[in-house]
Amino acid sequence: MHPSAHSQAAAEILIRDEVPRDGFAREILLDKAFGLNRHRKSSERLREGRLPAEGLAFTALRDNVLVGTLRLWDIETGDGRKALLLGPIAISPTLRSKGLGGQMIRMALEKAAALGHEAVILVGDEPYYRRFGFARTQMAGLDMPGPVDPARFLGIELREGALEGAFGLLRPAGRPAPADAPRRKAA
């Protein structure tokens, strides 16, 4: 192997807690990943007017450029059980399929469990999220506040039995966003 073959190491990626100055770059990345109509999705009904769950909003940076974002949100089931909604998660197109999204998800689930959260729910591709433990099996009695493909409505218990028998319409919980916080409107 030529001596210079390893001389260009990939730029290191830093995953850290989100800070307010990440907002603009985060929104651009999310628009690129999900399109300008992303605010019309059912999951958005659970995020509107709320702040992410305390300590559970993350940003990935490479060379001080935002290349990944993941946020979790406090929600409740119809029968009053506390849970988290994972999403959105977005990774820069140049870094997709390189493990960054998985690394961020594992880190978020570990931190959520350490903070005492018992379950996480999301809408996403089961073949991808299955590797982290997400499944449809616990979701039969739960509903989103809008249309959702049941095959994409997934959950994971961070504490065994946390979603067992859970039912009803998911609703937002947690901290309201300040009244003066900038809000993006659906296109």
Image (cartoon, grey):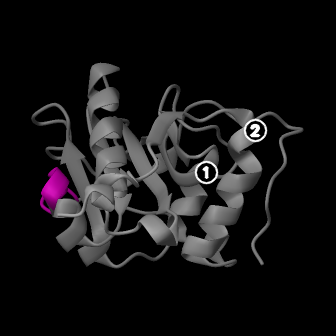
The residue lying furthest to the top in this view is 115
**Residues in magenta, as a range:** 131-139
**Residue 138 in magenta?**
yes
Closer mark to the observer between disc 1 and disc 2: 1
Q: Are marks 1 and 2 in contact (CB under 8 Å)?
A: no
Give, as a three-letter code, the residue at label 2.
Answer: Arg
Look at the image and tell me in which quarter the C terminus lies.
bottom right
Q: Position of residue 182 (x, y in %)?
A: 84, 48
Q: Is residue 9 left or right of residue 46?
A: left
Label 1 neighbourhood size at 10 Å, few (<14), some (14-19), many (20+)? Answer: many
Q: In the figure, 64 relative to 148: above or below?
A: above
Give, as a three-letter code, the residue at label 1.
Answer: Leu
Look at the image and tell me in which quarter the N terminus lies.
bottom left
Of the pair 111 and 86, the residue shown nearer to us = 111
Q: Quadrant of residue 64?
A: top right
**Residue 32 in magenta?**
no
Would you say the magenta stretch is mainly helix, strand or loop? Answer: loop
- Does residue 65 appear anywhere in the picture? yes
Label 2 neighbourhood size at 10 Å, few (<14), some (14-19), many (20+)? Answer: few
Q: In the figure, 160 relative to 38: above or below?
A: above
Of the pair 164 and 19, the residue shown nearer to us = 19
Q: For mark 1, what is the residue?
A: 66
- Does residue 140 appear anywhere in the picture? no
Q: For mark 2, what is the residue?
A: 21
Residue at image location 11% in from the left, 36% down from the top: 161
The residue lying furthest to the front in this view is 3
Q: Position of residue 47 (x, y in %)?
A: 59, 51
Mark 2 secondary-structure assignment: helix
Residue at image location 69% in from the left, 59% down from the top: 27
Of the pair 170 and 42, the residue shown nearer to us = 42
Of the pair 61 and 114, the residue shown nearer to us = 61
